Image (cartoon, helix red, strand yellow):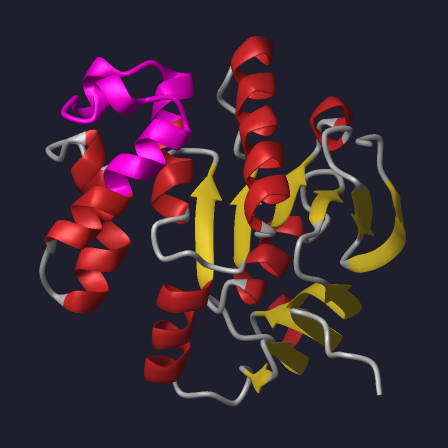
Amino acid sequence: MSEEPLVRVRGLTKVFGQGEAAATVLRGVDLDLDCGEMAALLGPSGSGKSTLLTILGTLLRPTEGEHRMLGEELTSASDAERTRFRNVHIGFVFQFHHLLPDLTAIENVMMPAAASRGRETGAMRQRAADLLDAVGLADRREYRPAALSGGQRQRVAVARALMNEPPLVLADEPTGNLDRESADQVMALLDRINQSTGTCFLISTHDEHIADHCRRHIRVLDGQLVAAELGGAS
């Protein structure tokens, strides 16, 4: 029997609202993601990309369908179970970095681990420092977000997403607010992390240039998966 993929969804449907006001955003999506993948989720605005990412991140429940990760069925799990699972196994990078302005870079990176443990430890601080070093910000550890450039803030957000060593990182338009040079630097960073750690990245974007950094392209249109093909990265 073949090994189960890291993520497996079948018949994923999401309907917002009821009756005449109901809007179906996802329509029976089937998708597998394997450990170590570097995949782009492509589609125009309103295609359902962000809704799919939000469900895969356990931040939203589907209306119908099966959602499994690491062999666990998550659709029927309680809110508390889903929160615990998410904190340990899933990292997030958003278009807007969502760094806490009053915390330093290293404190922002530590946040996922400190929040789950209820306190900061020396080991957490060391891991956060190592991650900032890995993303090229060793000399910016004590800087607050306002003192960092847009690209630097997003690299801090990447480091934060990796703090708990999740097997899956979901990125929703992570370069949407960056210029082309900064965007390419962030994507090159994600690729290096993917290659060195085996972390699976699913990156939502409408930008084909950004998608070309990924080795698999998954296309969504009108809430349906319409294609999954090899991408442009070697």
Residue 194 on image: x %, y % = 60, 43
Front in this rendered view, residue 116 or 83:
116
Report the residue at 71% width, 64% height from top: 26
Q: Does the magenta stretch include residue 234?
A: no
Report the residue at 40% width, 87% height from top: 78
Q: Does the image show residue 57?
A: yes
Q: Is residue 84 above or below residue 134?
A: below
Quadrant of the frame with the N terminus:
bottom right
Quadrant of the frame with the C terminus:
top right
Residue 232 on image: x %, y % = 84, 30
Q: What stretch is highlighted in magenta?
A: 128-154
Tell me if 199 is positioned left or right of 225 in this view.
left
Residue 126 on image: x %, y % = 21, 43
Tell me if 98 is positioned left or right of 51 in this view.
left
Q: Main secondary structure of the magenta part?
A: helix
Q: Does the magenta stretch include residue 141?
A: yes
Q: Does the image show residue 109?
A: no
Q: In this view, does 12 lie above or below 34?
A: below
Residue 54 on image: x %, y % = 53, 59
Report the residue at 53% width, 25% height from top: 186
Report the residue at 83% width, 81% height from top: 2
Q: In this view, does 168 lie above or below 132?
A: below
Tell me if 155 is positioned left or right of 5 in this view.
left
Picture mark count: 0
